[in-house]
Image (tube, grey):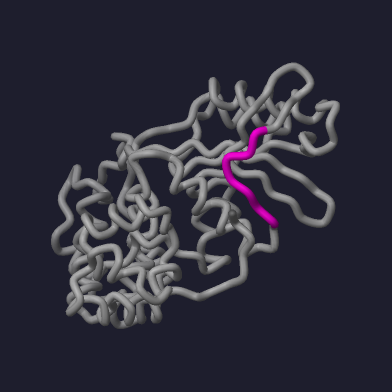
Amino acid sequence: MSVLVTKADGELEAFQESKLDASLSRAGASADARQKIVTHILHELKEGMTTEDIYRHAFDLLKKGDETPVAARYSMKRAVFALGPSGYPFERFFASVLSAQGWKTRTGVALNGRCAPHEVDVLAEKDGRRIGVEAKFHNDPGGRTDIKDALYVFARYEDLKKAPDPHSRVDEGWLVTNTSFTRNAIHYAQCSNLPLIAWDYPRDKGLQHMIEESKVHPLTCLTSLTDGEKRTLLEKNIVLCRDVRVPGVLHESGVRPHHIDRVMDEATRLCTPFSESVR
């Protein structure tokens, strides 16, 4: 008989060993480590146990097993939540993901539509194509972006598509969130041809897949930094894991001197640099 676990949005679903194993595998955990963790979780599993509890067990076991970079990658979804409480770091992070895929990006761009002015969270250009991105950040794992946001984004980018000034014109608009969309939002977007990106939507093309493919990591996934140190770095507009390796950044941000080597080592093992044009 399957055991029901509670998801972040409060819904119940049957626990699947394969799903846990796949998430550990994506993070780079060895077959031996995955087997040990799955066995441990099965032993601890109880009816109604939350997916957050399961994640925490797995994360702690990865850290104890000297799998620090793997633990950091496994915590990616939580690391993206930790970019809050404001949505600005999330905008910069998503711009960096697009930059890793060859897009030229800018954040917080003011454009004038046919009928009204708009501030675009992320403006991205590649191969003559110009897209505007509305980034909806949620601090709550159970938060969903609903049809009101889809309606709003569709309307504003229809306005920008018809902008008199070519410098304000876009080819299409995207609605991106770090959680999920309601069914009504998805139905409306499919009907109106509004591109949506959520954590795991579209399947195999969502935000999680984009992060893994681009190998861009938020600094909040570094397990060697305290929450306070992460917050200080974010306040300095340092959003990416790779940016902490810039000489002097950690020292100037108040990271304890004897702790810097450990942070630099984890960042080096975890983060892959790339050329980008976010500004």
Identify the residue at image location x=84%, y=51%. Answer: 128
118 relative to 11, above or below: above
**x and y percent of residue 20 in the render?**
34, 62
Q: Magenta span: helix, strand or loop, mainly?
A: strand
Camera-nearest residue between 39 and 150: 150
50 relative to 31, above or below: above
Q: Is residue 259 left or right of residue 10?
A: left
Q: Is residue 75 left or right of residue 272?
A: left
**x and y percent of residue 268 in the render?**
40, 80
Q: Quadrant of the C terminus?
A: bottom right
Identify the residue at image location x=31%, y=69%. Answer: 250
Camera-nearest residue between 107 and 18: 107
Identify the residue at image location x=42%, y=53%. Answer: 237
**x and y percent of residue 132 in the render?**
67, 39
Indicate whether residue 106 is drawn in magenta: yes
Camera-nearest residue between 230 and 147: 230
